Amino acid sequence: MINYIEKNKIFVLETNNTHYVFGIDKTGYNRHIHWGGKCSIKDYEFTDINGENSNNSMLDEYRQEITPFGSTMYRECDIKAKFADGCREISMHFENYSINGNTLCVNFKDDFYPLWITLNYEVYEDYDIIKRYVTLKNTGNDNIVFDRIFSAEFSLPSVEPYTFKNTNGAWGGEFLQTETVLDGGSLVYESRRGASNHNQSPYFIAHRNADENSGEVYFASLAYSGNFKVSASRDNYSVTRISIGMNDFDFSHTLTPDETFDTPPVYCGRANGFGEMSRNMNRFCVDVLMPKQFNDKPLPVLYNSWEATGFDVNSAHQTELAKIAAEMGVELFVMDDGWFGKRNNDCAGLGDWFVNPEKFPNGLDELIENVNALGMDFGIWVEPEMVNPDSDLYRSHPDWAYHYDHRNADELRNQLVLNMTRADVQEYIFNCLDELLKNHNIKYIKWDMNRPFSQTGAENLDDPQMYSYLHTMAVYSIVDRLKERYPHVQFESCASGGGRCDLGAISHYDQVWTSDNTDGIDRMTIQKGYSLLHPIKTMRAWVTDIEGINKPCSLDFRFNIAMQGALGIGGNLIKYSAEDLEICKRNTAFYKSIRNTVQFGDLYRILDIEKDEVLCNEYVSADKNKSVIFIAANGTRFYKKKFNLHFAGLDMKKTYSFALDGTEYKKGGAYLMNVGIPIYVRGVDYNRAIVLMSVDEK
Ligand code: GLA
């Protein structure tokens, strides 16, 4: 709900548990008032800021929704531009507003120059989530050149320093959490690589001593897969502010006469503990944000051939794998890299999206038909944004890769990035994928992207420094167009594993390849980081032959971990023993019986592998009639992991039945949450999955 207090021009955005309050003060400036617990609406007002002196400007103390560059505001600003006459200051003042249901637009106008700035809000009451973005409009006859356009500024309420969570990851170690106390100065999380990356994440999570179940947590996540920046600071008056948006590093945008520009949106919220934060965001993404073709459908169990066959793919071998996969209960067979052009290794072929006639002399359909005859759908790997210099595409269009005429184009994994800001490149990629989907019964595209950008000349653009934004939008638009034409095809966002995982990707793709690291032990930590602000349903997790690089773990153990997301299998099935195959079959069938609860349920992270030596995650269905709990540990110390497991998220009044280690239980939700059941974790390879069903008491 959106309330407006006319008397003192204050907007109160109300979600189930939160008030987000800002207004327009006497001078026409936007001012943030409150983000936190609900108060009586009539109590909200502006407080005066006193104590201005020659070195301390009142304006600099403002807490704002958006801070323009200029005047005596020296803190981080959000919008910075140069007008045609060289003026670099924006002076924005309130003009009017409109409320339409749960949408609010507040319009500001520059005092002199023809620039309008709109602050947009959408309130998702039941999810405790608010969407924010900024619209710029040039109503004059001259260009306005921006070198910074962030999407939102936030101010946090407490005078105490906040701890900021983000990721400090890498390829194979995505989503590893980092925590930093910000007691002064500033803190930046960003990507300068052209796209979002494995290292830092386009979000902030700020808290003071919060844990899974308690403590106020403030968070905001940018829905954008290009260069981003999250810049947090705490000033000498103990105010913590955060700006978030497209990175201003190597950025410039010219707003031409009559042009309007919308920033990428930010989704923000406030929760009681990290658990509630994740559950709110999970539900919001599944119900609201994700593409509508598959958001409400359980994702299939897939098999992916990459770790089994590498580039060495052909119809007979893939069919052999497919037969075994089908026996295990796999529903979607995905052929990975190697099927196109002269792709025998990673040195050649990217860009030539035509079936390799030596590997598939009878075309792709022979394999697809085999896979379909086995009762499975067929999926395929592509890396559309890339080109190998050793490819027909590059030989005919060397200018299609980002480059500078007099600089060497740096290769990474022997490949260059295509300049997706060019219309001809976009059409080429769209047409290649369109042909592929039109001519073959393909139900799934794994869209990969295996390197950051360099030599981003983009001289085709008036604003070459908009390349990251325009490239990102081109990727989204091709995926959207293909989805519209082929609504039965699922898309997966992959970037050497989890290098393009953000709410922008999740708004366009149905799932994400979480990490190339499929080590069951490492995955416990990677998946926890993923689950913080990304929906579980999108988290692809494979069981492979990596038995644990440092600590071996069994096939059952690896299934236990992979089943906590969207299950996949990626091992070399041809080498599996009859016993291994049985284990795969049993686990796949089990996963199918619980996947709705995992993919659509509420996640409670009960025990943390890093902190507690034991991982325990519980998923509870929306109606609280079913729950599945995964417990896993690989070598606990000192014989001390005997504890009562307190379940979470159940209905206090319902009775649940389940079995564990041969003991049958039938207990009330209140008992299970308050008293719990005894667990004795022992051995190097402990893994259990418990399924609770509510029983009718009548
Ligand atoms: C990337 C992906 C892998 C696989 C390879 C193929 O590394 O993350 O899963 O698809 O590319 O080259």
Image: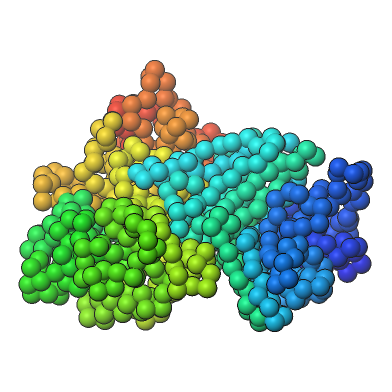
In the image, 267: left or right of 443?
Answer: right
Q: Quadrant of residue 240?
A: top right
In the foreground, 633 or 378: 378
Is the residue 176 above or below the residue 81 in the image?
above
In the image, 523: left or right of 148?
Answer: left
Tell me the residue at 54%/44% (across/down). Answer: 166
Residue 96 lies, in percent from the top left, at: 81, 74
In the image, 568: left or right of 269?
Answer: left
Is the residue 222 above or below the residue 436 in the image?
above
Quarter of the image with the N terminus is bottom right
Q: Quadrant of residue 31?
A: bottom right
Tell me the residue at 45%/54% (across/down). Answer: 193
What number of labels is visible?
A: 0
Q: Is residue 283 visible?
A: no
Is the residue 325 above or below the residue 74 in the image?
below
Tell me the residue at 25%/74% (across/down). Answer: 396
Name the outermost residue toward the front.
Answer: 406
Q: Is residue 391 visible?
A: yes
In the foreground, 400 or 271: 400
In the foreground, 594 or 560: 560
Residue 338 lies, in percent from the top left, at: 18, 61
Residue 99 lies, in percent from the top left, at: 75, 74
How has the structure been colored for display? rainbow
Residue 420 lies, in percent from the top left, at: 40, 70
Tell me the residue at 56%/37% (across/down). Answer: 179
